[in-house]
Image: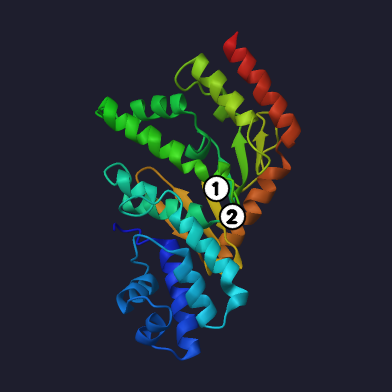
Amino acid sequence: MTKSTTILRRQLGRQLRDLRLASGLSIVEAARRIERGAGTVQRLEKGENPKIRLLDVEALTKLYDATERLEGLLEIARRAREGEGEDGAWWHEYGDVIPEVFALLLDLETIASSLTMYRPELLPGLFQTAAYTRALDSAYFRTATPEELDERVRVRLNRQRIITRRYDPVNVHLLLEEAVIRRVIGGPRVMAEQLRHLADQPPNVTVQIIPFGARYPLGIATGPFTLLDFDASTGEPATVYVEGYGTSTYYERKGLVDRYRSAFAQLREVALSPADTKRLLRTASREYRA
């Protein structure tokens, strides 16, 4: 398994280990009681199991007399299993096009309860159409082969499962500067399709645009960022992801996370309402088609 042993597997393993220790059982004894091998339980606790059996998670949780934790642990296990391939989570198949530091973001997105995103220049990958992604990556990765570009498109589209999945989709609040919808990526037809797609997001997604005519919230020049929040059952702290030119940074310190949260609130104050944003997106889409 690659660098993502993964976060959600580690979370699950850490919590199961804590419950086992609290119960006073050894790995060998716990494994014997659920009729599994000690190595299986040990790998589960370390987050190293390529395949997670929900029955094992349920049996161990009940063995540790922690049934009140069962739903939360099963939820982590289900999310860890989503898109599992031979080597774990779906993005492991794309290690050649996904840097390790970005694989961490994919792990976090998968278990997040909500994403709060601000983008001043380009649409985030979670909302890009295939054509928009291809146009962007063709310009950015100039030496990439058509096959490599196809892989990158598949990565972006696979990421979007967290928004469209039937079981507990992530909630997203996306703030965009108007420049994002006016900058032409891939040509008018690509933009028309992209803006229509953005206007037709499911109810768990809120999109707002900050129009050119809005007053500028002084001192809020944050650059693009994503704030990830998690259910308490995951044990993960709120985290800010900031992507720069060739660099990516994660912040967990509460004071800094709170500053980004406050910045988002101030930016949102000058944005169009979600309803007015949808109208603007549909109008702009029609203009690109004309």
Apparent side of residue 207 relative to residue 37 in the rendered image (left or right)? right
Please tell me whether residue 174 is drawn above or below residue 59 in the rendered image.
above
For image coordinates 51% across by 62% down, the residue present is: 76
In the image, farthest residue toward the bottom: 24
**Which colour scheme appears in the figure?**
rainbow
Identify the residue at image location x=34%, y=60%.
50
Which quadrant does the N terminus fall into?
bottom left
The amino acid at mark 2 is Tyr
Instruction: Name the residue beneath numbered marker 1.
Output: 222
Packing grade of label 2 (10 A; few <14, some 14-19, many >=20) is: some
For disc 2, the marked residue is 260
Cα distance, mark 2 to mark 1?
8 Å
Q: Is residue 286 visible?
A: yes
- Residue 22, image x and y in percent? 50, 88
8 lies above or below 33 = above
Q: Position of residue 253 (x, y in %)?
A: 52, 67
Residue 224 appears in the rendering = no
- Amino acid tagged 1: Thr
117 or 61: nearer the eye? 61
Q: Position of residue 200 (x, y in %)?
A: 64, 30
